Image: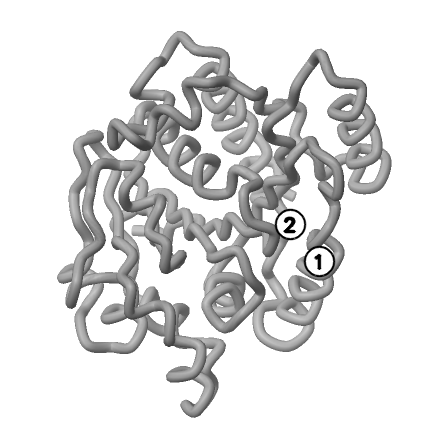
Amino acid sequence: MKKPYIFSVSNQKGGVGKTTTTVNLATALAAVGKKVLIIDLDPQGNATVSVGLKRKKGLNAYTFITGHHTLSQVIFETQIPQLFIIPSGKELLGIDIELADRKKPQFFLKKALKEIKSFDYVFIDCPPAVGLLTINALVASDYVIIPVQCEYLALEGVADLMKTIQKVQQNFNSKLTLHGIVLTMFDGRSNLSKSIVADVKSYFKDYVYDTIIPRNVRIPEAPSHGKPVVIYDVKSMGSKSYIRLAAEVLNKEKELSNG
């Protein structure tokens, strides 16, 4: 059995649709028969809540990374067939300090995931910061997806994240690949949104996905019901966009694998 494709979904700027992208991509892939695991590395636990779970004290990403529990002990089923999650825990808030004193702190997640084989895809929801949790995610990943909000200062933080990705490639994970940039919260009535799209495409070129995620009231509504938008309202514009994005991710992953 081959190892899964591991994706980090990261942006050090908060509020850009990182967790929403993680959860809905994972759900859309599960809906087409892929076995998918979400790892919620954000201490806020939004990905955990978005699939209808509560944060787990004592059985979560923290106890997994630090070796207190095995992979099988911290994986929980969600209400969505084929979709599983390692939930967040508040203990993650202090993990940077705890790992910093240990030998090779960048590799804890990679070591913990060494035996993972029963999944097709793993999506790691990173915290909105470039600390040791994000570094661990990037070191453990094959690919990284960066959500970028279609608003003023959209590229703020992305340049720093790109530098971090390059450092990880040079020092810890030479195989790490930028899979793509996904533009989120697009308002078709706004000239600013259109300008941001043009700027991002001009700068990142082929790394930008064709699918753009629109502003859609159903997207922020969905987590309050413990559901991804692709389940909460499958006919909404937000849902349809994430389904298209999932198809695009699948196709691009095949191209990268064959290349």
- The amino acid beneath tag 1 is Met
Image quarter of residue 205: top right
Is 172 placed left or right of 204 in the picture? left
* Secondary structure type for disc 2: strand
Please give the name of the residue rendered at 75% of the width and 56% of the height, measured from the top-left corner: 159
Q: Is residue 257 above or below residue 208?
A: below
Question: Which residue is label 1 attached to?
Answer: 162
Q: Nearer the viewer, residue 160 or 207?
A: 160
Q: Nearer the viewer, residue 23 or 156?
A: 156
Residue 5, position as x, y percentages in the image: 44, 48
Q: Is residue 96 above or below residue 200?
A: below
Q: Is residue 50 above or below residue 113?
A: above
Q: Nearer the viewer, residue 236 or 94?
A: 94
Quarter of the rendering occupied by the C terminus: top right
Please give the name of the residue rendered at 79% of the width and 25% of the height, measured from the top-left corner: 192
Tell me the crowding category of disc 2: few under 14, some 14 to 19, or many 20 or more residues within 10 angstroms, Cα based: some
* Secondary structure type for disc 1: helix
Of tags 2 and 1, which is closer to the observer? Answer: 1
Question: Which residue is label 2 attached to?
Answer: 178
Residue 137, position as x, y percentages in the image: 47, 62
Mark 2 vs 1: CB contact within 8 A: yes
Please give the name of the residue rendered at 53% of the width and 26% of the height, measured from the top-left corner: 245
Mark number, residue 39: none
- The amino acid beneath tag 2 is Leu
Residue 43, position as x, y percentages in the image: 36, 59
Residue 32, position as x, y percentages in the image: 34, 24
Tell me the crowding category of disc 1: few under 14, some 14 to 19, or many 20 or more residues within 10 angstroms, Cα based: some
Image quarter of residue 25: top left
